[in-house]
Image (spheres, grey):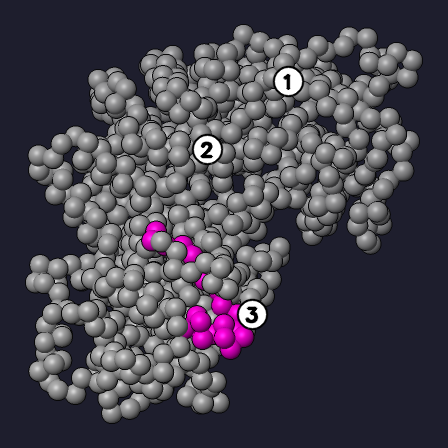
């Protein structure tokens, strides 16, 4: 059907119907107004006529102005809060429109009021651009208003291109004038002239002198004309620069600091309070100078910047020669929504949010569109300028979503980050590579782990814009490799103390040579150095052979020849490129090679214990002070990521690249470990090697993956075991059936030969998980406290055990499980071939799992039959 032939709808004013040839079902009508009273003057007859004809009318109420309609007028009033953010607001509007269905009449508050919530009128244009077509598809009529001289020309052009009807409304010398600028698929010789309201008619101004008098009176002043090309965001920062450069009083400056923090630092009230105190107006303007696009800089960027401000403000003399300045750019969060809207992704994005399946057809199509989308020309130019600034130095592009690294939500490892070695031959290739990386990080926002995490924590409907943090990789050139001397993770509250003399408040580090990727993630077959900062040279294992066994073997580096992140042997790197660094980080031992039983030559082997760093410098004390200072200011334990680089004078630079509130479990009330449990009732008894504080829980179900059976499976079958565990996990209610999951080697590994390759969403309903060692099969648990995997465990309240049955001091007796039937078939179909590998036991007699941090004892036992505990 031709659009002009659609059903006609009245404006409630016969004269206006005449000049517009009526409205049509599907019309979005935008009124450009000087005052809200003028808009309301034309809303009333439209609503009254719609109600008279028996149509449903819905008033979308969100403005800062007085309500234009009420339920007493016979309309449905839907209250909306734009301060929750663009996505929750737009999603709720979409939900309301979907629920009300077809043929409904709508009145929206003045769109210009959204600017105070979103800081940039560009997002107002985005909202209209996704809402208008959806209203059209539902055969509705909707009234909108925008204030004159409030929005940039670009935003007004986008609104005008998208809408079906666009009208200028003037009140001049007590008379109303309507000037149609766009009326889709309708035309008359005088339709687009200004029309003066005279009684019930609207008369076209056919005489030129009348039109000249009217239009001259509404023409903007010269001083305001230039600002029409600027977004509200730009005007805000121009005002901030004027305040910073002139002699305004302190209260004016502080008010502008609070204003800017609300629009670039995020919404977390606790972080905003800290930002208000630790950032000056000049600090915020410096952040703006390094921003690409508009909006928030995201949680990761805020944490990195805030940690530096805190340390320098609290003790600048102590830190000024050690703390390396950051060299970062910030890609604003609004670009994320712009990208979705302008690459026709929004409707798929809304559909995707409603489904549990992150691999649904909508999700797959959405990923494809994001991957092949285009960036605006002005943003591409800013990307180019940033790449020119960094030159050929490697950079890292990191996710920095609005909720990331906040109080209560770490999102550790849920979104992607990528290194860019930056060695492409041409600037065009570098730009293309950068754009691909940004697209991939945007895609990670709809990944399975991120969606499960948001659902579990009730964050699905919250505003989760994706900003990006672009940092120069801290390090130096070593031949054709690029890497920092050392890097790691620091935690201010150490729940993994392995000695009764350690103070958890002293904090701990997880250190590696090279890039910190091996510190934040579990490295297959390799280990980072754990150090309790009050006893940094004490290790959670025995000296001697175990020092070598649990030392770092490989190093993550940027290979500038291959233009990629890669892993190389620490031995090779130490011999060829790190001769000046290794004596400061590692123990030196001379080894002999043999040939047919004869000694042939000797060589130097380095064991990355980091003992020289702790013994010969103030590094442990300085790191402890940094984290204790941050914890005190945050009033919360913190988790930091950092790099260390040595200077020619032997001192070092410290660079804090990330800081966030640490979700941790305090030790809780001390638990007395019973000593009179009969030996045959003990399942697990060990000293240390657990994380989760003092606990005393009852276990009603045990799931065990037998190491021997798992070892003999094919690669595909091992992945199938991971799926089986995921199915059991989905059917498990932690409150109703507390469950202990045991398996060989490392849970969550990407290498099935080292453990079961589950993702965290496949074990997140467990009460406790245990990694069981079996050296003959190569299954070795790793106490990788401080990694993203462990952060997930801590946030989910899952107790962790690493048990080594082959050690003399460990009791591990699982024979009693053989007495129980295997309930695997009740959770999964067609699993006969795995019944000797995976066993699910629902216990008649529950297990008791208890631990005491002070004595470092853990005991899991069946209740004694005669002497009940």
The reply to whether dot 1 and dot 3 touch (C-beta < 8 Å) is no
The first of marks 3 and 2 along the sequence is 3
Q: Which mark is residue 407?
A: 2
The reply to whether dot 3 and dot 2 touch (C-beta < 8 Å) is no
The first of marks 1 and 3 along the sequence is 3
Which residue is at a point 21% across and 72% down the rendered structure image?
Answer: 175
Question: In whole angstroms, how far apart are the C-alphas of marks 1 and 3?
Answer: 55 Å
SS state under label 3? loop
Q: Which mark is residue 101?
A: 3
The image position of residue 284, as x and y in percent, is 23, 38
The image position of residue 732, as x and y in percent, is 74, 41
Is residue 303 shown to the viewer in this render?
Answer: yes
Q: Which mark is residue 694?
A: 1
Decide whether residue 61 is among the magenta residues. Answer: yes
Report the mark closest to the observer, 3 or 2: 3
SS state under label 2? loop
322 to the left or right of 74: left
Between 574 and 417, the residue placed more toward the observer is 417
């Amino acid at each position: 059907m031709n659009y002009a032939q659609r059903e006609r709808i009245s404006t409630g004013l016969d004269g206006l119907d005449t000049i517009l040839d009526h409205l049509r079902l599907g019309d979005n009508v935008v009124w450009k107004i000087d005052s809200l009273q003028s808009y309301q003057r034309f809303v009333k007859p439209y609503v009254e006529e719609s109600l008279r004809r028996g149509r449903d009318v819905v008033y979308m109420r969100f403005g800062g102005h007085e309500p234009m309609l009420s339920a007493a007028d016979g309309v449905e009033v839907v209250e909306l809060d734009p301060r929750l953010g663009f996505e929750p607001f737009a999603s709720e509007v979409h939900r309301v429109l979907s629920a009300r269905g077809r043929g409904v009449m709508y009145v929206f508050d003045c769109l210009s009021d959204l600017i105070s919530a979103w800081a940039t009128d560009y997002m107002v244009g985005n909202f209209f651009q996704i809402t208008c077509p959806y209203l059209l598809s539902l055969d509705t009529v909707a009234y909108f208003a925008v204030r004159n001289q409030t929005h940039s020309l670009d935003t007004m052009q986008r609104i005008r291109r998208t809408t079906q009807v666009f009208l200028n409304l003037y009140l001049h010398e007590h008379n109303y004038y309507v000037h149609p600028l766009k009326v889709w698929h309708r035309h008359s010789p005088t339709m687009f002239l200004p029309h003066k309201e005279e009684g019930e008619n609207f008369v076209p101004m056919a005489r030129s002198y009348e039109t000249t008098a009217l239009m001259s009176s509404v023409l903007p002043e010269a001083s305001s004309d230039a600002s029409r090309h600027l977004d509200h965001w730009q005007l805000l920062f121009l005002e901030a620069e004027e305040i910073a450069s002139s002699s305004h009083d302190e209260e004016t400056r502080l008010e502008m600091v609070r204003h800017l923090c609300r629009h670039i630092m995020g919404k977390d009230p606790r972080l905003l309070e800290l930002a208000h105190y630790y950032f000056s107006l000049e600090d915020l303007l410096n952040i703006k100078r390094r921003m690409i696009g508009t909006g928030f800089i995201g949680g990761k960027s805020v944490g990195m910047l805030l940690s530096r401000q805190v340390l320098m403000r609290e003790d600048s003399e102590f830190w000024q020669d050690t703390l390396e300045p950051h060299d970062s750019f910030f890609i604003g969060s609004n670009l994320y929504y712009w990208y979705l809207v302008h690459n026709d992704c929004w409707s798929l994005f809304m559909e995707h949010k409603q489904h549990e399946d992150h691999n649904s057809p909508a999700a797959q199509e959405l990923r494809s569109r994001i991957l092949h989308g285009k960036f605006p020309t002005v943003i591409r130019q800013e990307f180019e300028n940033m790449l020119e600034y960094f030159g050929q130095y490697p950079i890292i592009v990191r996710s920095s979503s609005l909720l990331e690294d906040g109080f209560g939500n770490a999102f550790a490892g849920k979104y992607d980050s990528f290194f860019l070695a930056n060695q492409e031959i041409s600037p065009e290739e570098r730009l293309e590579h950068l754009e691909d990386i940004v697209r991939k990080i945007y895609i990670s926002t709809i990944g399975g782990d991120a969606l499960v995490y948001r659902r579990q924590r009730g964050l699905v409907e919250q505003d989760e814009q994706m900003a990006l943090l672009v940092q120069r990789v801290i390090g130096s050139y070593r031949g054709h490799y690029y890497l920092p001397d050392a890097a790691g993770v620091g935690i201010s509250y150490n729940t993994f103390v392995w000695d009764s003399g350690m103070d958890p408040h002293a904090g701990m580090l997880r250190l590696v040579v090279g890039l910190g990727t091996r510190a934040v993630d579990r490295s297959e077959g390799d280990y980072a150095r754990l150090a309790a900062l009050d006893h940094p040279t004490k290790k959670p294992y025995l000296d001697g052979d175990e020092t070598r066994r649990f030392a770092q073997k490989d190093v993550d580096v940027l290979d500038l020849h291959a233009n990629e992140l890669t892993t190389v042997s620490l031995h090779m790197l130490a011999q060829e490129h790190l001769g000046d660094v290794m004596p400061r980080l590692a123990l030196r031992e001379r080894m002999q090679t043999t040939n047919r039983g004869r000694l042939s030559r000797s060589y130097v082997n380095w064991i990355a214990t980091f003992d020289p760093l702790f013994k010969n410098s103030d590094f442990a004390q300085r790191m402890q002070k940094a984290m204790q200072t941050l914890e005190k200011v945050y009033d919360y334990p913190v988790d930091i990521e950092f790099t260390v680089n040595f200077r020619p004078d032997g001192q070092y630079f410290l660079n804090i690249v990330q800081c966030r509130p640490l979700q941790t479990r305090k030790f809780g009330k001390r638990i007395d470990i019973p000593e009179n449990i009969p030996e045959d009732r003990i399942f697990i008894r060990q000293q240390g090697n657990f994380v989760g504080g003092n606990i005393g829980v009852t276990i009603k179900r045990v799931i065990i993956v037998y190491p021997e059976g798992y070892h003999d499976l094919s690669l595909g079958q091992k992945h199938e075991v991971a799926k089986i565990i995921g199915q059991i996990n989905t059917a498990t209610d932690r409150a109703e059936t507390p469950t202990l999951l045991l398996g060989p080697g490392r849970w969550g590994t990407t290498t099935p030969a080292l453990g079961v390759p589950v993702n965290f969403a496949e074990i997140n309903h467990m009460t406790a998980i245990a990694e069981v060692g079996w050296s003959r099969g190569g299954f070795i648990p790793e106490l990788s406290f401080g990694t993203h995997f462990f952060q997930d465990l801590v946030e989910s309240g899952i107790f962790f055990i690493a048990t080594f049955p082959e050690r003399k001091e460990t009791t591990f007796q699982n024979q009693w499980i053989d007495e129980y039937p295997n309930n695997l078939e009740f959770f999964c179909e067609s699993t006969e071939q795995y019944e000797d590998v995976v066993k699910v036991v629902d216990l008649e007699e529950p297990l008791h799992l208890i631990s005491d941090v002070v004595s470092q004892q853990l005991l899991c036992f069946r209740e004694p039959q005669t002497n009940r505990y």
